[in-house]
Image (cartoon, helix red, strand yellow):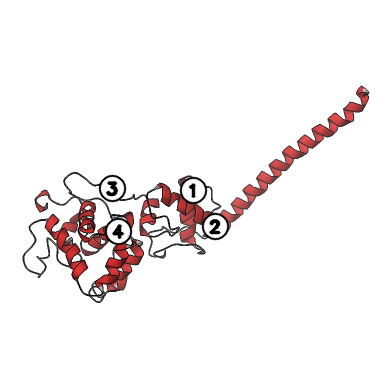
């Protein structure tokens, strides 16, 4: 081939390469512009633990709660367009987060997932000597024959916190009013320690009125805390006590030890 014939081909190849690079740049610019547009049009973020957010944030919702969810997931390595839409990509990111953090992988952002994303954590491991509210929750679940799952432990510590501030949970550790600080099952006196109290918490739930059956069924299934919570506060025993859920504690519960003499 004559050398002169190669020059136009080289020029064409260079031109094609330049065009490809420019095309990539334009595509990236378009994607960035789209992401910026999504961010600009997304509802303003709302804290996941705010009363403005539903107990369960799930597929198909569009709100500032979802905007906040997407931003938090992105901080944990997701690469979501922050648009406030709970679509397939957000669902996949939620399930991935739940799987890697020891949570129930259901794609529903309930209290346990919210607490974890919002700076909380999954239940801590048992401590030597069974000394905290989380350890007490595990004792109750073990005595009752229910799974010591993240969902069930979260439910129990939130239930206790609905009775007393987390800092003094042992004053009335049993939401059925059978606890160490509330009196021996008959409203008088007290159990000798929290280990005995935990036994009677479980016994009372398993042997109590029929409406407790909804609670124990949810515990057996390790239902989400929002589901078991509703069974708790909608029971005839508890309805007025928790104001049909308005007085029920939600969110992350800190790990707090009871006084050593209570163990």
Name the residue beneath numbered marker 3. Answer: 124
Residue indicated by mark 1 = 74
- Indicate which disc residue 152 carries: 4
Q: Spatial distance from mark 4 to mark 3, Cα to Cα?
A: 13 Å
Residue 230 figure quarter: bottom left
N-terminal of the two: label 1 or label 2?
1
Q: Disc 2 or 4, which lies upstream in sequence?
A: 2
45 sits to left or right of 81 = left
Mark 1, other Cα within 10 Å: few <14 / some 14–19 / many ≥20: some
Q: Which residue is denoted by mark 2 in the rendering?
A: 88
Name the one closer to the observer, 190 or 222.
Answer: 222
CA distance for labels 1 and 4 = 28 Å
User: Which mark, by number, is residue 87?
Assistant: none
Mark-to-mark CA distance, 1 and 2: 15 Å
Do callouts 2 and 3 mark residues in contact (Cβ within 8 Å)? no
Q: Earlier in the sequence, mark 1 or mark 4?
A: 1
Callout count: 4
């Amino acid at each position: 081939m004559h050398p002169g014939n190669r020059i136009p081909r080289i020029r064409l190849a260079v031109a094609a390469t330049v065009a490809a690079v420019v095309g990539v740049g334009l595509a990236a610019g378009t994607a960035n512009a789209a992401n910026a547009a999504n961010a600009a049009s997304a509802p303003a973020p709302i804290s996941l633990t705010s009363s403005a957010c539903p107990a369960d944030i799930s597929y198909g919702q569009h709100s500032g709660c979802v905007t906040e969810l997407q931003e938090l997931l992105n901080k944990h390595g997701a690469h979501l367009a922050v648009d406030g839409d709970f679509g397939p990509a957000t669902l996949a990111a939620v399930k991935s987060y739940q799987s890697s953090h020891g949570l129930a992988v259901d794609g529903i952002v309930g209290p346990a997932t919210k607490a974890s994303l919002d700076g909380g954590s999954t239940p801590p491991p048992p401590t030597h000597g069974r000394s905290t509210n989380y350890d007490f929750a595990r004792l109750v679940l073990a005595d009752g024959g229910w799974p010591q799952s993240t969902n069930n432990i979260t439910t129990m510590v939130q239930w206790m916190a609905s009775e007393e501030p987390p800092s003094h949970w042992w004053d009335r550790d049993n939401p059925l009013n059978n606890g160490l600080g509330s009196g021996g099952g008959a409203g008088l006196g007290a159990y000798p320690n929290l280990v005995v109290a935990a036994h009677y918490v479980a016994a009372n739930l398993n042997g109590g009125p029929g409406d407790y059956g909804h609670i124990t069924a949810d515990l057996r299934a390790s239902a989400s805390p929002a589901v078991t919570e509703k069974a708790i506060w909608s029971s005839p025993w508890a309805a007025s006590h928790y104001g049909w859920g308005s007085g029920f504690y939600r969110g992350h519960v800190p790990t707090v030890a009871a006084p050593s003499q209570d163990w």
